[in-house]
Structure formats: C-alpha cells, structure tokens
Image (tube, grey):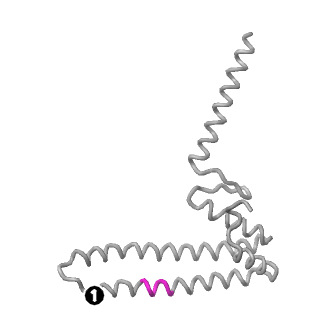
Amino acid sequence: MFGFFVGTVSLIGLAAMAFRGRRYRYAHGMTGMHRGMRYGMHRGFRRRALYYVLERLDTTPGQEKAILEAIDGFSERARAAADDARETRKDVAEAFRADAFDRGSFAALFDVHVDAATTLRDEFAKTVATIHEVLNERQRQRLADLLETGPRFAYGC
C-alpha cells in the first residue's frame, strides 16, 4: 500500500516537472533546434527560415559559412542604417518645436537617408553577388524557384 502511494506521488512530481520544463522552454524562447543550435524568440524564425532554405539548396558547410557571413554583414549594416533613421525623429521633432518652419533644413534631413539607402542598396547587391558566386548552377536555379514561389515553409506546405 505504501509503495502505491510513493509511486503515485512520484508520477505526479514527474508530470509537474515535465510541464514546468516545457513552460520554461517556451517562456525563454528555447523551442527551435537545428543542427544542435538553440534559437531565441527574436531571431529564431528568421534563422530557421534561412537554415530551411540552405537545407533545401543542399549547401556544403563552406557554402553555408560564406552565405551566413554575407547575410550577417548586410544585416549589421542595415541595422546601423535603421538606428540612424531613428535619430531623425529627434530632428523632425525639433523642426516642429521651432517658431518658424524652415523647408530647406527639413529637406536636408532626408538627404542623409537617401544617401544611406543608396549605400544600403549597393551593399545588398554585393551580398546577393556573393551568394550567387558561392552557389552552383543547380542551387541557383533552386533558390530562384524558392524566391519565386514565396515562403511556403511558413504555411507547412
């Protein structure tokens, strides 16, 4: 009789620990796994989507490394450009606080962003060129097909 009680309490404790562990993983963004890596909630979906594409292309580890370096480099530059764009809000707010609206200085605020967008466009072209060089003909055709059809992996197709 005592063994039955101990077994029941142990089973309840095991179930509670399993539930807490799953809840902990979801709360801290440790739900996705790919090649032994854990992904956080913030970048997890994008990174998993990228690994999905690399897997579909059947890339080698060397190709994956070159592609990931190119994409990460572009992402850093795009993030820096976005941070600079956020600083413009302060300048726009100052334009509204002024007694008289100066069209010339207000238009000059956006010249910096036009230059940044041009630079970012050129960096994106360089990133795409790097990826194009790394892939072979079959992989480029497969990537073109994936880009044309859109993100089917997101819908479970």
| Label 1: few (<14), some (14–19) or many (≥20) C-alpha neighbours in 10 Å | few
Above or below: residue 79 compared with residue 101: above
| Residue at 69% over, 23% down | 10
Q: Which residues are magenta?
A: 113-118
Above or below: residue 146 compared with residue 106: above
Quadrant (top left/top right/bottom left/bottom right) for the C terminus:
bottom right
Q: Which residue is mark 1?
A: 103
Looking at the picture, which amino acid does disc 1 mark?
Arg
Q: Quadrant of residue 36?
A: bottom right
In this image, 122 relative to 143: left or right?
left
Q: Nearer the viewer, residue 87 or 98?
A: 98
Location of residue 120 in the rendering, given as x and y in whole percent from the top left corner = 53, 83
| Residue at 48% over, 74% down | 80
Report the magenta stretch's main SS.
Answer: helix
| Residue at 19% over, 82% down | 100
Above or below: residue 43 compared with residue 101: above
The residue furthest top is 1
Q: Is residue 152 magenta?
A: no
SS assignment at label 1: helix
Location of residue 55 in the rendering, given as x and y in whole percent from the top left corner = 77, 67
| Residue at 28% over, 73% down | 93
